[in-house]
Image (spheres, grey):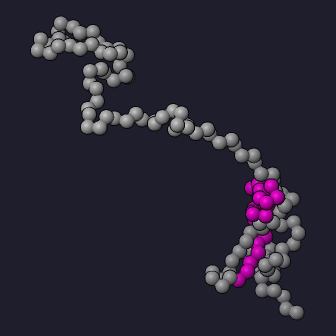
Amino acid sequence: MSRPRFWDPDGERFGLPTFPWRMAPDGYLTRRQLRARGLRPGGQPVAAQILWRSRRSGVRAAYLYRTTLAKPVRPMTPPVPRRSPRRTGPAVPARPVGGTPDTSCPPTSVPACPAPTASRSRPDRDETPCSR
């Protein structure tokens, strides 16, 4: 019996220990297999690989990690609560259609309405106090 094409357990031919499809030894898992068991690679380097031929894309690879060096999956953080649009309304109040903004008051960044002074008052305009 001839040896399989991608059999290189010492890593001499491919640089990493290489096994054919479904022939990886115990103790090695892919990322998906680790995740299914509640583990993660945890910063360890790739320990081995599986190579196989694919009709569509030639030779494919799957990287394997040691289960003895794998760490448990970190717990997920709780999600940030979202603002309910029904309770709080729109984030920006709607402007009146075709209207202009109210200019009788200064912007809210100004602490208070200035008091009218004689030098600032004009006789042709009647001064309207701020509604604030």
Residue sitting at 75 percent across and 63 percent down? Answer: 32
Image quadrant assignment for residue 56: bottom right
Q: Is residue 16 visible?
A: no
Q: Work out which quarter of the rendered image holds the N terminus and state it.
A: bottom right
Q: Which residues are magenta?
A: 31-53
Residue lying furthest top in this view? 118
Residue lying furthest left in this view? 124
Left or right: 26, with 21 as reference point: right
Please state the horizontal and vertical placement of residue 3, each as a whole percent of the image.
84, 88
In the rendered image, residue 36 lying in the magenta stretch gets the answer yes
Vertical relation: 17 (above or below) 105: below
Vertical relation: 61 (above or below) 116: below
Left or right: 30, with 132 as reference point: right
Residues 9 and 63: in front is 63
Please state the horizontal and vertical placement of residue 20, each as a whole percent of the image.
79, 80
Residue lying furthest bottom in this view? 1
Q: Is residue 105 visible?
A: yes
Residue sitting at 63 percent across and 81 percent down? Answer: 57
Image quadrant assignment for residue 12: bottom right
Residue sitting at 18 percent across and 6 percent down? Answer: 118
Image quadrant assignment for residue 46: bottom right
Residue sitting at 26 percent across and 21 percent down? Answer: 104
Vertical relation: 131 (above or below) 54: above
Q: Work out which quarter of the rendered image holds the C terminus and state it.
A: top left
Residues 23 and 80: in front is 80
Residues 83 and 39: in front is 83
Please state the horizontal and vertical placement of residue 129, each as a whole percent of the image.
27, 13
In the rendered image, residue 129 lying in the magenta stretch gets the answer no
Number of numbered discs:
0
